[in-house]
Image (cartoon, grey):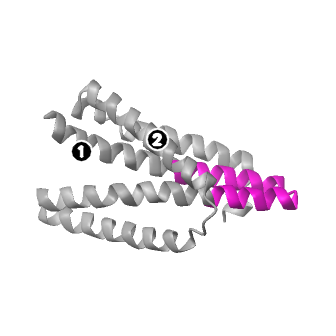
Amino acid sequence: MASRVPPAVAGGAYLVFTAITGVMISYIFWAYTGNTIVLAFALTTGVFGVMSAIGYTTKRDLSGLGTMLMIGLFGVIIAGVVNWFIGSSMLSWIITLVALPIFLGLTVYQTKQVKELAMEAAMRGDERAASQVAIMGAVGLYVTFLNIFLILLRILDIFNGD
């Protein structure tokens, strides 16, 4: 389906998606202190940048890593749904601590995948495919960045005693 959407429409949808997501997470300004938000954002930016650089420069085949990360992500989602019903703070912490390395790994994996797909499209001279790879890659990396940020907010909240 994504291949049938013109890049301009997909780009517009991406902007709308990020704006809506921004509005939906605006609760953080009521739930956390400004210092915690700034620290979490700075840490997220740094760690995301490092992980992305690793993904961009690595020569290794990461396809096996992608499969493991997706299995882990589904496990985290299932555990989160279960915890929504049972309300265990211990399980919530376990989910948080397991989710962080999964999303860090996804940053490496997604960055490498976007690079490889963009290079393939460029070698074929397919500008439309390159635009679609860029937009879909941006969506995936944005969601990953956002999840790392929210996880670090939770962790810092406990350590800062907010």
Q: Is residue 120 left or right of residue 75?
A: right
- Horizontal side of 99 relative to 48 (left or right) equals left
Residue found 26% across the figure and 63% down from its top = 80
Q: Quadrant of residue 70?
A: bottom left
Residue furthest front as drawn: 59
Which quadrant does the N terminus fall into?
bottom right
Q: Quadrant of the C terminus?
A: top left
Which one is closest to the eye, mark 1 or mark 2? 1
**SS for dot 1:** helix
Residue span colored magenta: 113-141
Are dots 1 and 2 in contact, CB under 8 Å?
A: no
Estimate how packed mark 2 is, as few (under 14), some (14 to 19) or many (20 or more) residues with alpha carbons within 10 Å.
Answer: few
Q: Residue at x 78, y 62 (%)?
A: 120
Tell me residue 122's x, y (percent): 82, 55
Identify the disc placed on residue 20: 2
Q: x, y (%) of residue 3? A: 72, 62
- Taking the spot 19% from the left edge, 56% from the top edge, the residue there is 93
Tell me, yes or no, whether the highlighted magenta stretch contains residue 133: yes
Q: Please name the residue that numbered disc 1 is placed on.
A: 155
The structure residue drawn at horizontal position 20% and vertical position 61%, both measured from the top left corner, is 84
**Label 1 to label 2: alpha-carbon separation:** 25 Å
Residue type pointed to by label 1:
Ile
Q: Which mark is residue 56?
A: none
**Secondary structure of the magenta portion, mostly?**
helix
Q: Is residue 74 left or right of residue 52?
A: left
Residue 44 in the image, given as x and y percentages of width and height: 41, 40
Of residues 127 and 21, the one nearer the viewer is 127
SS at circle 2: helix
Say whether residue 154 is left or right of residue 132.
left
Say whether disc 1 or disc 2 marks the residue closer to the N-terminus: 2
Kind of residue at disc 2 = Ile
